[in-house]
Amino acid sequence: MALVALGVTGGIGAYKSVDVARRLQQVGHDVTAVMTAAACRFVGPLTFEAITRRPVITDQFAPGANADIEHISLASRIALLIVAPATANVIGKLANGIADDFLSSMYLATRAPVLIAPAMNSNMLEHPSVQRNLARLSEQGVRFVEPGEGYLACGWTGKGRLAEPAEIVAASRQLLSPDGRLVGRTLLVTAGPTCEDLDPVRYLGNRSTGRMGFAVAAEALARGARVRLVVGPTPLEPPAGAEVTRVRSAREMHQAVLECAEGADAVVMAAAVADYAPADGARPGKIRKGSGALTMRFERTPDILSELGRRRAGAALPVLVGFAAETQDLVQRARDKLREKQVDLVVANDVSLPDRGFAADTNAATLVTAEGEEDVPLGTKRALAAVLLDRMETLIHAPVAS
Ligand code: C5P
């Protein structure tokens, strides 16, 4: 079966983690326990060693464990990393790329799926910092087993108790043998803004960060798809495993998308593509300021999605998905786009509210198809991506009408 790393951090739920290790082993997995210093104060490493019949890792710099840089070596061999219980502190470290012990270093080094079971006091769980860190991890593709409600060790009653070991093991089973609903399929996703250079110094851009497109790409990868990602300028890292083409302008994105769409089963245009670019291209020298107004002429950029819609001309594939970032008449405008661009689905996104759309970690949207509308409530962008891909899978797998 699989090699699983079980990260144990310093919460009272650490004792339940022994049962997680035992259950994983019962179904045939090899388990290596990785304990933080705080975890060792709650449960003795010997307990995990006896259960897993493997040395327990408690120290990044333990003599004898560095011959093959153990955190990298283990990171590349495991099929799954589980962190149960995950304290607010460790969640914060993982979400922010801090690598000051074995577990947090291994999190950065591994490309295996990661499953986190948070456990903490309910006020800590609800704190905006913790919620932001959880959302960030979710964006990175981490899966969660939600904490349960009930009596907490601190004497409170509320949400925050470590999920039951059986639940954690059930969730890990899904990640160890993914359903692979998109295995053998290729998705092209665009993400981020485009920048239209005005001169060597200035450009016309927009507020897109690429988060939504990256969430779609990460979710498609998790479902086994091959993912081509065409990305406009953004400082964010695309998900590991995607084949990335970087572009700057709408014109470059147009060219890259047409090339990458070849043989794709679906195209998701999540990028915010500029509608206008300077008519004669960027000025070669810096535009000097004068005393009066500045006038520049802009021309329309090619509408990439419309072109894909025209090229597909009635065929079932590729499934085409557009995004409609609007500030008013959301659904009506999305419906117009669905028709005008000849696409299968438009994700209508209200970008006038602070907790959705550009740069936010969360999003809410209405999925508009020829059949009707579906509201997806506010949640992480990854959660919206999961609903979107569920709907797209139905279209991708739909039998071709004869
Ligand atoms: O027409 P509008 O720009 O509002 O449509 C938005 C959708 O069309 C998005 O999916 C965006 O990626 C795509 N688009 C495009 N080419 C453009 C402009 C937008 O493919 N030039």
Image (cartoon, rainbow, N blue to C red):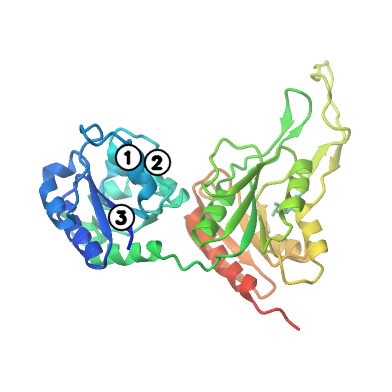
C-alpha distance separating marks 1 and 3? 13 Å
Which residue type carries mark 1? His
Please give left or right for residue 10 compared with residue 190 in the image.
left
**Is 151 situated left or right of 363 in this image?**
left
In this view, the residue in front, 135 or 331, is 135
Near mark 3 (Cα within 10 A), the count class, few <14, some 14-19 or many ≥20, is: many
Residue 15 location (% of width, % of height): 14, 54
**Up-down relation of residue 297 to residue 84 (above or below):** above
Q: Which mark is residue 379?
A: none
Quarter where residue 167 is shown: bottom left
Q: Say the numbered circle drawn on residue 71.
A: 1
- Label for residue 4? 3
Report whether residue 48 is seen: yes
Mark 1 falls on what kind of element? helix
224 or 321: nearer the eye? 224
- Can I make out residue 117 in this image? no
Secondary structure found at label 3:
strand
First along the sequence among labels 1 and 3: 3
User: Percent from the top left, x then y, of residue 131?
Assistant: 37, 47
Kindly identify which numbered label has been placed on residue 109: 2
Instruction: Look at the numbered discs 2 and 1 and tell me whether their residues touch, using CB distance below 8 Å.
Output: yes
Return the x and y of residue 154 as percentages of the image width and height.
14, 50
